[in-house]
Image (cartoon, helix red, strand yellow):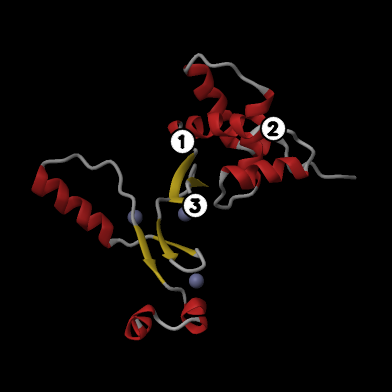
C-alpha cells in the first residue's frame, strides 16, 4: 500500500490559499493547486527553477510562467515570503503557522541559519516610540562566513594583503 503524503487534508495551506483565491474572485485551477501542494510538501527554501524541476521529476508539467504567476499570490496571502534575491531571482520560504525568524547567511556557500533574537522586539519598540510608527514587521539578514567556509578558504581580510 502506498501512503498518500500529498493528501490535501494534511495541507492546511491549501485551504488558506483557496479561500484567498475565492476572496479575490480568481479562478481555482488544478495547476495552482499542484504548485501549492508541492511547495508545502517540502518545507525548504526554494526558487522557481527548483520547484519547476521537482514538479517535472514527478511527471507534472507545469510551466515556469504558471509558477511565476502563482508565487506572488502565495506571498500576498501570507503563506510564503521572499527570503533573498540572488542570481537574478527571488528565493522563497514557507512561513504559514511558523513563528517569526531572521536569517544568518553564509556569503560563500549560501548556508542559512534561522534564528530569532528577542532584542529585535526591543528595537521595534524603540523605533515605534522614536518615530511614532506602528511597526508591522521586520526583515533581517545577517551575512558572514560559516565555520566550514572559514576553514576552507583564507579569511577575506587576509587576501587583501596580497593585492
Ligand atoms: Zn526577527
Ligand atoms: Zn559557508
Ligand atoms: Zn527562514
On whether ligand 3 comes within 8 Å of the CB at mark 1, the answer is no
Residue 114 is marked as none
* Quadrant of the frame with the C terminus: bottom left
Q: Earlier in the sequence, mark 1 or mark 2?
A: 2
**Residue at the extreme right of the image, as rendered:** 1
Q: In screen coordinates, is 143 left or right of 61? A: left
What residue appears at the point 52 percent right and 82 percent down from the top-left corner? 152
Q: Secondary structure at mark 3?
A: loop
- Few, some or many C-alpha atoms within 10 Å of disc 3 (few <14, some 14-19, many ≥20)? few
Where residue 44 sits in the image (x, y, percent)?
A: 58, 52
**Residue at the extreme front of the image, as rendered:** 163
Return the residue at label 3: 87
Q: Earlier in the sequence, mark 2 or mark 3?
A: 2
Q: Could you say which quadrant of the image residue 140 lies in?
A: bottom left
Return the residue at label 1: 75
- Few, some or many C-alpha atoms within 10 Å of disc 2 (few <14, some 14-19, many ≥20)? some
Q: In screen coordinates, is 132 left or right of 65? A: left
Q: Nearer the viewer, residue 50 or 121?
A: 50
What residue appears at the point 48 percent right and 32 percent down from the top-left corner? 72
Amino acid at each position: 500500500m502506498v501512503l498518500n503524503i500529498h493528501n490535501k487534508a494534511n495541507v492546511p495551506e491549501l485551504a488558506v490559499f483557496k479561500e484567498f483565491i475565492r476572496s479575490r474572485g480568481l479562478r481555482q485551477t488544478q495547476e495552482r493547486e499542484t504548485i501549492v501542494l508541492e511547495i508545502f510538501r517540502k518545507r525548504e527554501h526554494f526558487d522557481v527553477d527548483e520547484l519547476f524541476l521537482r514538479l517535472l521529476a514527478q511527471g507534472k508539467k507545469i510551466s515556469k510562467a504558471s509558477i511565476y504567476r502563482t508565487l506572488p499570490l502565495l506571498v500576498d496571502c501570507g503563506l510564503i515570503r521572499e527570503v533573498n534575491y540572488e542570481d537574478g531571482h527571488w528565493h522563497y520560504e514557507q512561513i504559514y503557522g511558523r513563528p517569526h525568524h531572521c536569517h544568518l547567511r553564509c556569503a560563500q556557500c549560501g548556508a542559512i541559519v534561522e534564528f530569532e533574537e528577542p532584542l529585535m522586539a526591543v528595537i521595534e519598540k524603540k523605533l515605534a516610540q522614536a518615530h511614532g510608527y506602528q511597526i508591522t514587521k521586520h526583515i533581517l539578514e545577517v551575512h558572514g562566513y560559516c565555520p566550514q567556509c572559514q576553514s576552507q578558504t583564507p579569511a577575506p581580510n587576509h587576501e587583501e594583503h596580497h593585492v
